[in-house]
Amino acid sequence: MSTETIAGAIAASSTGVTLATYFPEATPQVMICSLAGAALYVLSSKDHERWKQAVFAMISFIGGVYCSETAADIIAAVINAGLSHVDPSARIRVSPAIGALAASTVSVTVLLRVLHRSKTGSLPGLDSNSKEDKP
């Protein structure tokens, strides 16, 4: 192995450890799935400038880590709603890692859509013809 390869590996691992300290509540599975979801988003999104892709990847990763439990609960609720009609009734539990994957994949898309709608004024409550504006 060359000195550059070893130095790169040490730098990458120390960066990973440093990044992990910012999210003490996240398990390694949640971190890996958030990273995978961020990569999936960046690879499947429209072409953007490189700096925007980097920012979107970071937002996606952070959204996956912090929203993993909530996304897992939502996924489980949707699946369990369908399973409640099965005889005998069944229930599942969704891992927070799967929630992290889903949350990191959709978090930037949701944020960009809200941002776009807020700019165009098409968010609920921002419509110029809303009842609140009329006397």
Image: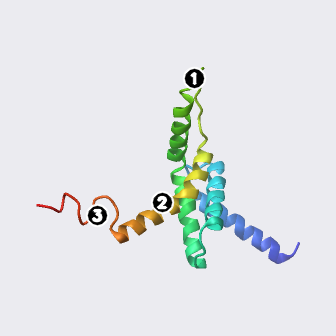
* CA neighbours of label 3 inside 10 A, class few (<14), some (14 to 19), many (20+): some
Q: Quadrant of residue 53?
A: bottom right
Q: CA distance from mark 1 to mark 3?
A: 44 Å
Towards the viewer: 115 or 31: 115
- Mark 3 and mark 2 lie on one chain; the one further toward the N terminus is 2
Q: Are marks 1 and 2 in contact (CB under 8 Å)?
A: no
Label tally: 3
Residue at the spot of label 2: 110
Quadrant where the C terminus is found in the figure: bottom left
Residue at the spot of label 3: 126
Residue projecting furthest to the top: 88
- The residue that appears at 53% across and 45% down in the rendered structure is 69
Q: Nearer the viewer, mark 3 or mark 2?
A: 3
Quadrant where the N terminus is found in the figure: bottom right
- Mark 1 and mark 3 lie on one chain; the one further toward the N terminus is 1
Q: CA distance from mark 3 to mark 2?
A: 18 Å
Residue at the spot of label 1: 89
